[in-house]
Image (cartoon, rainbow, N blue to C red):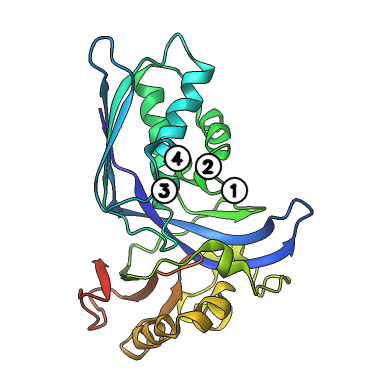
Amino acid sequence: MLHFPNAKINLGLSVTEKRPDGYHNLETVFYPLPMLKDALEVLPARDGAASDMRISGKSIAGAVSQNLVWKALELLQTDFPEKVKPVSVHLLKTIPMGAGLGGGSADAAFMLQLLNRFFELELSQDALASYALQLGSDCPFFIYNTPHFAQGRGELLEPIPLDLSAYSLQLVCPRIHVRTASAFSDIVPGPAKFPLREIAALPLSSWKEHIVNDFETTVFKVHPELARIKQRLYDEGALYAAMSGTGSALYGLFEEGKQSSIADDEQAEVFYFH
């Protein structure tokens, strides 16, 4: 059985306060990118064999046992030991990592959905979202996989009626891995500059003046080349440009059919969707 976990971008991202548990409360809008995706396959394991997992495509650091796809499998095996039998898993990794596109979280959430169907567990979306939260703060979003306003650590979700299909989107993924911990290091929490749950009512032509990603301040200091890419997107016609999540990916929203001249090279992968 095949499934195709997709990426996301953040439309605005405000760090509103430091929590007693050491995490931060956020406000953001998650917007799915169904055009950019990994491939995830699950097959029954050979008779008598234990579960196994193979990864191809982009290289992923760390042991398979630490991969969120594997952790999703273990989670459901623990709660449904009589139903969730050994499987052979193949993940084809295409979504750039360390880029703020949520690829690892998507893989985990889609693995839960795939196993739910494969073994006929009959778990509801909300039940799957509860399992997904055990794997990561933004994993529940990928269970619903439609535009959502998010609060808390990213797990408090509220659907919003936002459709960007009338625009072209250019995604630039520099070959830079931004560590989330370092992105948070110099953040000063404060109230959001714009109520992002109302983003659908704000003309896209006004987003530049109102919608901000707080992490650009800290990440651009360390990686000024990212600031230059953002400015170039604007210089070449973007109506709105921003960094996604904690970076390093940047995106530009253009009038339909338009894009910047930034091209794929050894410094960055570039994707264009229209």
Viewed as shown, does residue 143 lie left or right of 156?
Answer: left
Quarter of the rendering containing residue 56: top left
> What is the quadrant of the C terminus in the image?
bottom left
| First-in-chain label (3 vs 2) | 3
What is the residue that sits farthest to the right in this orientation?
Answer: 20
Q: Amino acid at mark 4?
A: Gln
| CA neighbours of label 1 inside 10 A, class few (<14), some (14 to 19), many (20+) | some
| CA neighbours of label 3 inside 10 A, class few (<14), some (14 to 19), many (20+) | many
| First-in-chain label (2 vs 1) | 2
Residue at the spot of label 2 = 140
Q: Rounded to the nearest whole Å, what is the CA distance between mark 4 and mark 3?
A: 11 Å
Camera-nearest label, 3 or 2: 3
Q: Amino acid at mark 2?
A: Pro
- How many circles with numbers are drawn on the protein? 4
Relative image position of residue 258 (x, y in whole percent): 25, 78
Relative image position of residue 221 (x, y in whole percent): 53, 83
Relative image position of residue 126 (x, y in whole percent): 55, 32
Camera-nearest label, 4 or 3: 4
Q: Amino acid at mark 1?
A: Leu
Residue 157: which disc? Answer: 1
Residue at the spot of label 3 = 104
Q: Rounded to the nearest whole Å, what is the CA distance between mark 3 and mark 2?
A: 12 Å
Residue at the spot of label 4 = 66
Viewed as shown, does residue 35 lie left or right of 217?
Answer: left
Camera-nearest label, 3 or 1: 3
Relative image position of residue 151 (x, y in whole percent): 64, 55
Residue 111: which disc? Answer: none
| First-in-chain label (3 vs 1) | 3
